[in-house]
């Protein structure tokens, strides 16, 4: 069958497929590194670099079966044997519908399922093309079930694991001995689950097509070897590092009146003659403060300008970090005041001192803390008295009983060290597997479109070209670098504060849930599992730690994903079928 007249559709498909891959990178990649960025074990730039490497590698090595993905059991492509051009138009429509909705969700900072997007888009174009006879509605029922099964099952698994870690490690007066004993087990579990997931998914490019028992045996053997290595080398090194850190923190410390955190300030004189201050802070303190300020939405009166108290604007994360270090007051509504001041500034108000200090973005804690120290000196010279914002509240307003106020848990420095690399490891494994799985959502329709064009029929027997997989991986990485921070912010910080221990729990338990559920036939979504784990662990850490309004918005986005993506796809399909194809 001559297909040259439809070359324009293939070219259009390549353009739209890159946009779709971009949207997948902007939204779905937050599944892998959102919690790692939120806990502070990696920076956003480091996460983008690691994700780019592992997403691209995973898409090339594990994504060879994406030619089948567009079907997903949702439509019968054999119904298009006599109208191949209609199926080609459908593939283009599916990509448009999925890309548009994922870009909208990314703009709104809402994590959604890329798989559900492409399924909804497929249903949309099929309804326009051949009506309801081409749709397998039972698959849609499974998707609806996954909205509830995924977050509940993953949340239960994550919550159970976190409770065990909290009882046997975090709540101990000295968490190091138990933490070091558990370290080989944690590494072994991480390796076993991820190796099994990768090998079970299959990597035809590597020739890894093995029976289930062989995959389980290999995974278990690799995990044991890795656990032995960790016990023999990593645990002694970690013990020495924790001991050295404890000694370094004994050289002077101050108490933060906001979170009772302990900090050590060490002065280092460099060749330029300046003294740079290094701050040792409790892990999670800055995130905890961010969240406490974030959920403080109660109506309060703006403090009078005549008061001799120093207030700090709540307008950026560095402001909150400053407050955490120095114990500066943070007023919930003062951020709206003085709109003429620069957005990146800290406003200091007093009866004799009123000035705005431009905040610079520093690349290290040392230089930033140096700026904090300078701000302290300036405040003292101006006669500004520092006082907690809670002391400025309306005296007639009833205060919450401190005994009833739940405090969010934060990792001690030694616990941070124990779980730091573990969370990075789980995030990298997750990114690798995600690249192999979700590249299908990005370029599955493009692969189908390309093979139809090359073979002239709907039966696609040829293997997926590796260069198409690489093309999808590049698009995913581009979306991550340009727009990925939006959903990463939601997953890693806005839903609930995350520490390395809770982040590791979320990563490991959600990955385990996906592997188990997939093998027993339960419909689950990776995105939904990760969100469920984040919410469950956050709720266990503190009843007030979860932003339930944000979670409600995310759930609504899940609910409308299939119909909205399908609606966009149907509109494009109608345009192609009735407005363009008849005249080509």
Image (spheres, rainbow, N blue to C red):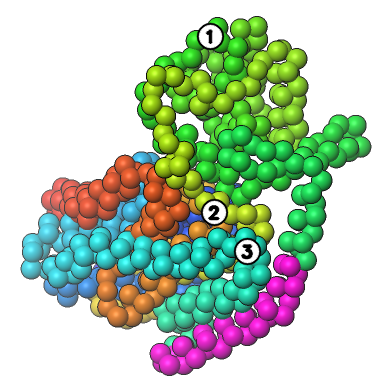
The one nearer the camera, 210 or 253, is 253
Label 2: which secondary element: loop
The answer to which quarter of the image holds residue 141 is bottom left
- Residue 499's disc number: 2
The quarter of the picture where the C terminus appears is bottom left
Residue linked to disc 3: 175
- Could you classify mark 3 by the number of other residues whose Cα lies within 10 Å: few (under 14), some (14-19), or many (20 or more)? some
- Could you classify mark 2 by the number of other residues whose Cα lies within 10 Å: few (under 14), some (14-19), or many (20 or more)? many
The one nearer the camera, 195 or 529, is 529
Work out whether 345 lies above or below 100.
Answer: above
Q: Residue at x 22, y 53 (%)?
A: 559
Q: CA distance from mark 3 to mark 1?
A: 47 Å
Q: Earlier in the sequence, mark 3 or mark 1?
A: 3
The answer to which quarter of the image holds residue 528 is bottom left
**Contact, CB < 8 Å: mark 2 with mark 1?**
no
The one nearer the camera, 214 or 255, is 255
């Amino acid at each position: 069958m001559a297909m040259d007249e439809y070359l324009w559709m293939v070219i259009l498909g390549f353009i739209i497929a890159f946009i779709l891959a971009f949207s997948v990178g902007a939204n779905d990649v937050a599944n892998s590194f959102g919690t790692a960025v939120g806990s502070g074990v990696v920076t956003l730039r480091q996460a983008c670099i690691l994700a780019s490497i592992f997403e691209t590698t995973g898409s090339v090595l594990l994504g060879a079966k994406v030619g089948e993905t567009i079907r997903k059991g949702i439509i019968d492509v054999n119904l298009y044997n006599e109208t191949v051009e209609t199926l080609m138009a459908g593939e283009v429509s599916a990509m448009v519908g999925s890309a548009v909705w994922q870009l909208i969700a990314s703009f709104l900072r809402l994590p959604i399922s890329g798989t559900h997007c492409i399924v909804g888009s497929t249903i949309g174009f099929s309804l326009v093309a051949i009506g309801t006879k081409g749709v397998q509605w039972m698959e849609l029922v499974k998707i609806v079930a996954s909205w509830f099964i995924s977050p509940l099952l993953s949340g239960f698994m994550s919550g159970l694991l976190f409770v065990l870690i909290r009882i046997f490690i975090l709540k101990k007066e000295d968490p190091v001995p138990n933490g070091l004993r558990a370290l080989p087990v944690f590494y072994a579990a991480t390796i076993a689950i991820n190796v099994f997931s990768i090998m079970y998914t299959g990597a035809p490019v590597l020739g890894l097509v093995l029976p289930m028992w062989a995959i389980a045996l290999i995974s278990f053997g690799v995990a044991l070897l890795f656990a032995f290595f960790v016990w023999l080398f990593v645990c002694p090194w970690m013990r020495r590092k924790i001991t050295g850190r404890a000694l370094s923190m004994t050289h002077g410390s101050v108490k933060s009146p906001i979170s009772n955190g302990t900090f050590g300030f060490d002065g280092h004189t460099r060749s330029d003659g300046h003294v740079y201050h290094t701050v040792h802070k409790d892990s999670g303190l800055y995130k905890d403060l961010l969240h406490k300020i974030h959920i403080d939405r109660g109506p309060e009166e703006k403090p009078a300008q005549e008061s001799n108290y120093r207030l700090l604007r709540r307008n950026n994360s560095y402001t909150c970090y400053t407050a955490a270090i120095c114990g500066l007051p943070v007023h919930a509504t003062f951020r709206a005041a003085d709109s003429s001041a620069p957005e990146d500034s800290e406003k200091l108000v007093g009866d004799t001192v009123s000035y705005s200090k431009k905040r610079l973005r520093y690349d290290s804690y040392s230089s930033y803390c140096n700026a904090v120290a300078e701000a302290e000196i300036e405040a003292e010279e101006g006669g500004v008295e520092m006082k907690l914002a809670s002391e400025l509240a309306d005296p007639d307003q009833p205060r919450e009983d401190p005994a009833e106020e739940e405090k969010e848990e934060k990792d001690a420095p030694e616990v941070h060290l124990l779980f730091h690399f573990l969370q990075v490891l789980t995030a990298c494994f997750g990114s690798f597997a995600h690249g192999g799985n979700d590249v299908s959502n990005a370029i599955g329709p493009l692969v189908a479109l390309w093979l139809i064009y090359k073979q002239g029929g709907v039966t696609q027997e040829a293997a997926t070209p590796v260069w198409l997989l690489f093309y999808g991986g590049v698009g995913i990485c581009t979306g991550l670098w340009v727009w990925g921070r939006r959903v990463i912010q939601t997953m890693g910080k806005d839903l609930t504060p995350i520490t390395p221990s809770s982040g590791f729990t979320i990563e490991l338990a959600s990955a385990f849930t996906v592997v188990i559920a997939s093998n027993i036939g339960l419909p689950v979504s990776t995105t939904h599992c990760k969100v469920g784990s984040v919410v469950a662990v956050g709720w266990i850490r503190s009843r007030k730690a979860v932003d339930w309004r944000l979670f409600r918005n995310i759930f609504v986005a899940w609910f409308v994903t299939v119909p909205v993506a399908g609606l966009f796809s149907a509109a494009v399909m109608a345009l192609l079928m009735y407005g363009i194809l008849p005249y080509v």
